[in-house]
Amino acid sequence: MVKTLDAPVLKKTWPVMENYLIIHNKHDYELAVNMLNQLLDEVGGNDKHPLYSFLEVLGIIIENYEAEHYDLGDATGADVLKYLMQEHELRQDDLPEIGSQGVVSEILNGKRQLNVRQIQKLSERFKVSPAVFL
């Protein structure tokens, strides 16, 4: 069964949602990143959580804004992690929040992608937006 759009409900919720889903400037960007951080705290890596798809959509919107307004190059999450590890003089076994040394190695070598939980932990540890790892 296909769900139909409930226009009255959308009319009430859209003014709140558009604050996070439409990014025109740095202020909007910061609101969206703050919401992404809150969602990561709430949802974590639970892809069954009712807000998981919102987290994914918001991450894509932030990523698109950053690609257009910030020169992040073609850095992957692993590239960002490598850079942060160098800057903080960390070894693979210094990141237990990601997993074992073997898991970290697989991420750094591109054999495994960072998951939502790992991104959340890394953004907290390094005090950066989770979007830098997307």
Image (cartoon, grey):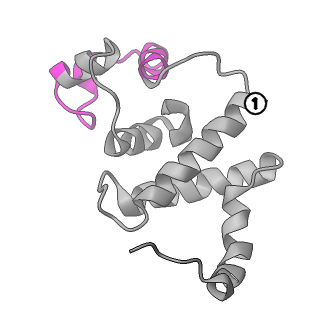
In x, y percent, where is residue 53?
45, 57
**Neighbours of disc 1 within 10 Å: few (<14), some (14-19), many (20+):** few
Q: Residue at x 40, y 45 (%)?
A: 120
- Quadrant hosting residue 4: bottom right
Could you tell me if residue 128 is visible in this image? Answer: no
Which stretch appears magenta?
A: 78-102
Q: Residue at x 28, y 23 (%)?
A: 112
Q: Is residue 86 left or right of residue 15?
A: left
Amino acid type, callout 1: Glu
Q: Is residue 83 left or right of residue 12?
A: left
Whether residue 25 is situated above or below residue 8 in the rendered picture: above
Whether residue 124 is situated above or below residue 74 in the rendered picture: below
Could you tell me if residue 20 is visible in this image? Answer: yes
Query: 100 or 48, which is in the foreground?
Result: 48
Query: 25 or 18, which is in the foreground?
Result: 18
Query: 75 or 85, which is in the foreground?
Result: 75
Name the main secondary structure of what is drawn in magenta. Answer: helix
Given the current orientation, which residue lies at the most extreme front position? Answer: 1
